[in-house]
Amino acid sequence: MSLGGFQSGFSARKVSRSEVRWGQFLICNHGCEEVIQLISHVSGEVEFELCKIEAERMAHVLLEASKAERS
């Protein structure tokens, strides 16, 4: 399932854990069955994978960073 893209040249999709490309590097000890993949628009390859919980955490961190004052 494609979830849209970013101007930085990536799109995202959700796949089942059995479909991960880089399973040995997947940081997940939650037992998540869904994985978010970031796909390069240039190569069409999976560049990054996060379990659903870690993807939500990353989204929260990015949103907070966008709201923060510059130091």
Image (cartoon, rainbow, N blue to C red):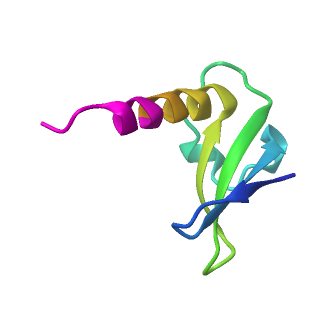
- In this view of the protein, which residue sits in the foreground, 26 or 36? 36
Residue at 68%, 51% (x, y): give it: 37
Residue at 59%, 40% (x, y): give it: 26
18 w.r.t. 22: above or below: above
Residue at 60%, 29% (x, y): give it: 56
Find residue 13 and report its horizontal and vertical position in percent.
Answer: 76, 52
14 w.r.t. 5: above or below: above
Residue at 78%, 34% (x, y): give it: 34
Extreme residue toward the bottom, this view? 42
Extreme residue toward the right, this view? 1
The image quarter in which residue 62 lies: top left
The residue stretch that appears in magenta: 62-71
What predominant SS class does the magenta segment belong to? helix
- In this view of the protein, which residue sits in the foreground, 16 or 8? 8
- In this view of the protein, which residue sits in the foreground, 70 or 40? 70
Find residue 11 and report its horizontal and vertical position in percent.
Answer: 68, 61
Is 40 displayed left or right of 67 in the figure?
right
- In this view of the protein, which residue sits in the foreground, 13 or 31? 13
The quadrant of the picture occupied by the C terminus is: top left
